[in-house]
Image: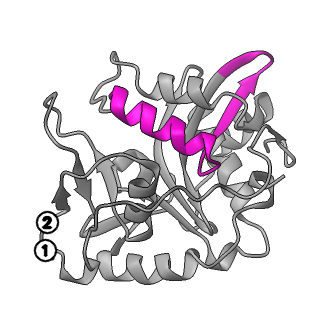
Amino acid sequence: MPNESPRSSAPQGPPVEPPPSVWTFGDPRDFDPFDDLVAIGADLAPGTLLAAYRRGLFPMPSGTPGDPTYWFCPVNRGVLPLDGLVVSRSLRRATRDFEIRVDTAFEEVVDACADPGREAGWIDEDIKGAYLRLHELGWAHSVEAWQGDRLAGGLYGVAIGGLFAGESMFHRVRDASKVALVGLVGLLRDEYADDRLLDVQWRTPHLASLGVVEITRAAYLRRLSMALTAPWPAVLRV
């Protein structure tokens, strides 16, 4: 298995609460029950992003430069139960080949996830800048799989209390992103694991093979309310 005490360069102390957003997303119970897209516009300031995640939303570019940001709260949300991660025999073997680190190369992870050569790439410069600002404030984190001095793969997301909202993952070496996910689950499976929520936005066939399930929007919002009151993992508050 990956190193159980990963090297960490997480920001010291608790995350810094930014100024509140000037935007409001409304009551999630009033969102269209048949549409994942629930809002258009606003900005990507740290306060806006945190307000969105706390309401169950996340941003994505529209795909057309200059268009306003799209905000989603999926009708069927992909989540990974912390006791439901599927680790195949080959993946278990692969974990021995990597060292897990946290926040030692956040910008490089985001850059790799944003590689324009990736199929269905969606991360633009505005998104990259927004999450770098969140990272500087202590809210966004990367979990990385290393082989020696080479970053082999990883993922990044937003941690608010017991919520980890995964944004994207990448690999340069086979299974490296999966190993990073194994490492993340290991970090979240502490004494507060029952209250934590690992959000992956949508359940894709690839994520389903790793144990991701779908829950309704209403169920997600109930789980989110509980997760936000839990402390964030100790490795992110060293």
Judged from the image, the secondary structure of the residue bearing numbered disc 1 is loop
Label 2: how many residues lie within 10 Å, few (<14), some (14-19) or many (20+)?
A: few
Q: Nearer the viewer, residue 96 or 148?
A: 148
Label 1: how many residues lie within 10 Å, few (<14), some (14-19) or many (20+)?
A: few
Range covered by the magenta-colored residues: 124-151
Above or below, comparing residue 5 to residue 65 in the picture: below
Q: CA distance from mark 1 to mark 2?
A: 6 Å
Judged from the image, the secondary structure of the residue bearing numbered disc 2 is loop
Where residue 80 sits: x, y (%)? 51, 62
Q: Is residue 83 left or right of residue 35?
A: right
Measuring 76% from the left and 36% from the top, which residue is drawn there? 101
Where residue 124 sits: x, y (%)? 32, 28
Q: Quadrant of residue 226?
A: bottom right
Residue 108 marker: none
Callout count: 2
Measuring 57% from the left and 27% from the top, which residue is drawn there? 107
Q: Amino acid at mark 1?
A: Asp
Above or below, comparing residue 105 to residue 221 in the picture: above
Q: Amino acid at mark 2?
A: Asp
Does the image show residue 174?
A: no
Q: Is residue 143 magenta?
A: yes
> Which residue position holds label 1?
32
Q: Nearer the viewer, residue 2 or 221?
A: 221
Residue 35 marker: 2
Q: Are marks 1 and 2 in contact (CB under 8 Å)?
A: yes
Q: Quadrant of residue 147?
A: top right
Measuring 32% from the left and 82% from the top, which residue is drawn there? 218
Q: Is residue 218 left or right of residue 151?
A: left
